[in-house]
Image (cartoon, rainbow, N blue to C red):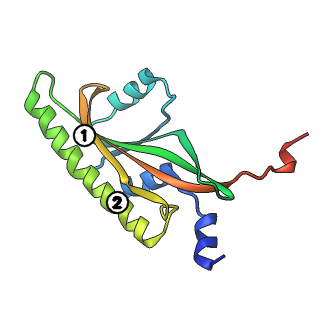
């Protein structure tokens, strides 16, 4: 096994940490929230409504599929998303359009940052699946927030040998 492969195996993607990195460095993001796909929607809407400006929501619901390709490992393909939201003016479709333009521009920057880490094989993104990127308009959320949802997948090879410490 190569040194590079060993390093990649030890480094697992942490969506919330990567979201914090983006929020700390991407101009235009004023607030950062973490969420689960299982989170109470009312709670998330309430948290969003307490903020202003443009915000980034990192969603990690621990959603995965598994692939078996007649090898000694399984592939776990985990899905993640970032939501970029901007507060809009009630009853003003033009402000919704502007929020979606802001969201699209910022999600393209996030894609660029994900790809930079993919190419550098850093932060657990060596197994990012670039063909999985999707964006969708989203809103309203909270108190009139609209924007863009970016989803993507990361593959991780896992062994299916049992850990005897976890069995009685």
The residue to which callout 1 is attached is 53
Residue nearer the viewer, 132 or 93? 132
Which residue: 59% across, 54% down?
A: 69
Which residue: 26% across, 54% down?
A: 108
Q: Residue furthest right?
A: 168
Q: Secondary structure at mark 2?
A: helix
The quarter holding residue 65 reads top right
Classed neighbour count for the residue bearing mark 1: other residues with Cα under 10 Å, few (<14), some (14–19), many (≥20): few
Q: Is residue 27 visible?
A: no
Quadrant of the drawing holding the C terminus: top right
Vertical side of 91 occupied by 78: above or below: below
The quarter holding residue 33 reads top left
Classed neighbour count for the residue bearing mark 2: other residues with Cα under 10 Å, few (<14), some (14–19), many (≥20): few
As drawn, is 144 to the left or to the right of 62?
left
- Image coordinates of residue 128 in percent, x first then y, are 45, 58
Vertical side of 71 occupied by 164: above or below: above
Q: Secondary structure at mark 1?
A: loop
Q: Is residue 25 visible?
A: yes
Which residue: 40% across, 43% down?
A: 81
Which residue: 45% across, 49% down?
A: 153
The residue to which callout 2 is attached is 25
- 3D distance between C-alphas at marks 2 and 1: 16 Å
């Amino acid at each position: 096994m190569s040194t590079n492969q060993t390093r990649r195996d030890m480094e697992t993607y942490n969506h919330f940490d990567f979201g914090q990195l983006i929020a700390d460095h991407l101009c235009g993001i004023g607030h950062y929230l973490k969420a689960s796909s299982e989170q109470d929607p009312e709670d998330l809407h309430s948290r969003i409504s307490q903020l202003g400006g443009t915000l980034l929501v990192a969603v990690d619901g621990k959603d995965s599929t598994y692939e078996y390709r007649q090898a000694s490992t399984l592939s776990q393909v985990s899905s993640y998303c970032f939501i970029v939201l901007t507060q809009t003016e009630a009853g003003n479709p033009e402000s919704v359009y502007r929020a979606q333009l802001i969201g699209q521009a910022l999600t393209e920057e996030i894609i660029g940052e994900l790809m930079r880490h993919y190419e550098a094989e850093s932060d657990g993104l060596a197994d990012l699946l670039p063909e999985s990127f999707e964006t969708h308009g989203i809103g309203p959320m909270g108190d009139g927030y609209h924007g863009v949802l970016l989803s993507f997948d990361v593959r991780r090879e896992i062994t299916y040998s049992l850990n005897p410490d976890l069995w009685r």
